[in-house]
Image: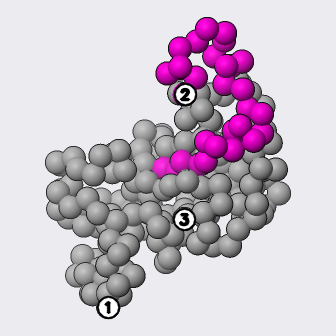
Amino acid sequence: MARRGGNAFRPSRAPATARVLNNLPGRYPVENWHACYWTVSEDGSLKEYAVVLQLPEGYAAACEPVRVGESGCVLRVRRWGVACRISLLEAIGFDPVAIAGAGAPDEEIAGICFAATQFDLPGGFVIADPDYPFLLFDPSGTLKGSSVHGISLLGALAYFVSEGRVAADFQRLRRDAPSLYRQALNDLL
């Protein structure tokens, strides 16, 4: 399959059976957040997933509650998973230098920040659109992040049918020409 769309369309590296995700286990205190999302397999079938993301302790206090469709602490949803806002790490006093050790190169420190907030998710091609929103709940069950602007169901199907040559989210088509979006979706299903 030809690879297009850069990082947004790369496959997830998460094991299919993963249910608790932490890229740096045991290196700092964490909170258990609950991610609920939909994936698409290469045969076009949809599956709902729920996993625990272990974000740094204090992250929940730095995020305000949101409604579905408001991003909150979710920066972006990609085929491979979710990126939460790195900027909140400073607000909670997260210290990557203490984790990396004094004198660690900048690349290692940045890598710790990315690893603490970005997660590959199990289940195939992760989508996020108004019909299949990505939802992120803090440890108390409060919705603190969501996305309806990731790659749509049509985007995932078009990617698979075209063997990777079509790498688009199709959100503009969905918004500006909903009947054409539905027709294309029905044709690919």
Badge 2 or badge 3: first in the primary sequence: 2
Identify residue for label 3.
147
- Mark 2 lies on residue: 110
The residue sitting at 35% across, 84% down in the picture is 176
Q: Can see residue 31?
A: no
Task: Indicate how the structure is coloured in the image.
Answer: one colour
Q: Which residue is drawn at 73% across and 32% down?
A: 94
Q: Is residue 172 above or below residue 124?
A: below
Q: Is mark 1 on a helix, strand or loop?
A: helix
**Horizontal and vertical percent for residue 146?**
60, 64
Q: What residue type is labelled 1?
A: Ser
Q: Is residue 101 left or right of residue 140?
A: left
Query: In this image, 7 relative to 37: left or right?
Result: left
82 part of magenta stretch: yes
Q: Is residue 155 above or below residue 59?
A: below
Q: Give the range drawn in magenta.
A: 81-110
Q: Dot 3 lies on which element? A: strand
Q: How far apart are marks 3 and 1 (CA)?
A: 22 Å
Q: Horizontal placement of 44 versus 161: left or right?
A: right
The answer to whether residue 81 is above or below residue 117 is below
Mark 2, secondary structure of its residue: helix
Cα separation, mark 2 vs mark 3, equals: 24 Å
Choose the circle earlier in sequence order: 3 or 1: 3
Would you name the residue on which mark 1 appears? 179
Crowding at dot 3, Cα within 10 Å, few <14 / some 14-19 / many 20+, comes out as: many
Depth order, front residue of 171/132: 171
Q: Position of residue 125 (x, y in %)?
A: 39, 56
